[in-house]
Image: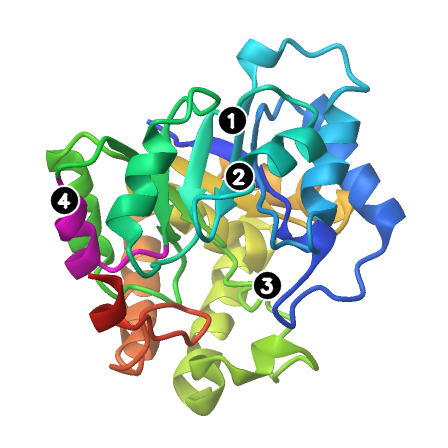
Amino acid sequence: MKPEIALGTWEFGGGFGFWENQNRSDSLKTLHFAIRSGITSFDTAPTYGSGKSEQMLGQQLKRFPLQREKLCIASKTTNGKHLEQSLSRLCTSYLDVWYLHYPAKEQHEILERMANRKEVKAVGVSNMPLTLLQTLEDLPLRWVQVPCNLLWNKETEALKQYCRKHEIRTSGYSPLAFGLLSGTHDDPPEDGRRNLYCYRHPKEFRALTALLRDIAKIHGTSPSQIAIAWSLCQGFDQIILGARTKAQLAEDLCALNLTLSPHEMELLEKASQAICSFIPEDQDNLFGHRWNHENTL
């Protein structure tokens, strides 16, 4: 069964050295196209453009004749605070999912408080390594959000198994690895992505992107669609698509109609394993972060 598709809104606000020059008009057209295409799940965070993404999403959703109960709006927090501000920007009285954006000191207590908020239907964690996730077993976690793409496989299978065992839904973000799997970034882009580990191993990275282009040619489609089609087959409950323009999102959604052959999936898996073997031991996230495990227990 295909996973649910959600629209990610990090690109709309930018932050952390990514998407800082995003055009507002492009963001609005992308969001409107997503709504008109039937997407009803949306993922945002107050740190995306210091609230800009939340505000844009909330203001635009209320312009459409949508029933709130049929939408799934997820946002995040770094400390279990400022829920009221997020709700105000999103023009809603409740969140369907409220994530702890990344591991934090005293995270157990933070998540307990989050779970007790009546304005929140479900609580989840994002960017949480398995060793830390296992310390939260007594909490009513409903969602775990981690990367799902060909450039990141660290703990992915173990995390999915843990979530299935504990009846936790999985949300996979960045199937295009921040656009690096689109076939247009064999060389480092001039933004925060240039520091990602894959650019220190150009042979393996370019072998993967070349394979994406080869398979795309066979299907008469784009490398982006092949990368997304692979992610859709990874057993996640939800895949988050991010796009900077309406055209990008339209292209990405076409991946829903693609079927990769077992041989193609095998080739992609081998190329992914080759580059992922270079993921640094001291990184817990595709961004290059290392969460301080000692300070989060």
Identified at 41% across, 26% down, the residue is: 117
- The type of residue carrying mark 3 is Gly
Q: Residue at x 43, y 73 (%)?
A: 208
Q: Please tell me which of labels 4 and 2 falls first in the chain.
A: 2
Q: Nearer the viewer, mark 1 or mark 3?
A: 1
Residue under label 1, please give it. 95
Q: Is residue 129 magenta?
A: yes
- The answer to which quarter of the image holds residue 105 is bottom left
Amino acid type indicated by mark 2: Ser
Q: Amino acid at mark 1?
A: Leu
Q: Secondary structure at mark 1?
A: loop
Q: Are marks 2 and 1 in contact (CB under 8 Å)?
A: yes
Where disc 4 sits, the SS reads helix
Residue at coordinates 80% horizontally, 65% vertically from top-left?
Answer: 21
Q: Is residue 181 magenta?
A: no
Give the residue number, with chain letter if any, for mark 4.
Answer: 162
Q: Is residue 237 left or right of residue 207?
A: left
> Label 2 vs label 1: CA separation?
7 Å
Label 2: which residue? 75
User: Which residue is under mark 3?
Assistant: 179
Q: Quadrant of the N terminus?
A: top left
**Looking at the picture, which amino acid does disc 4 mark?**
Tyr
Q: Position of residue 246 (x, y in %)?
A: 77, 43
Q: CA distance from mark 1 to mark 3?
A: 28 Å
Instruction: Single out the mark in the foreground, 3 or 4.
Output: 4
In the displayed structure image, the side of residue 7 where residue 276 appears, left or right: left
> Dot 2: few (<14), some (14–19), or many (≥20) neighbours within 10 Å?
many
10 Å crowding of disc 1: few (<14), some (14-19), many (20+): many
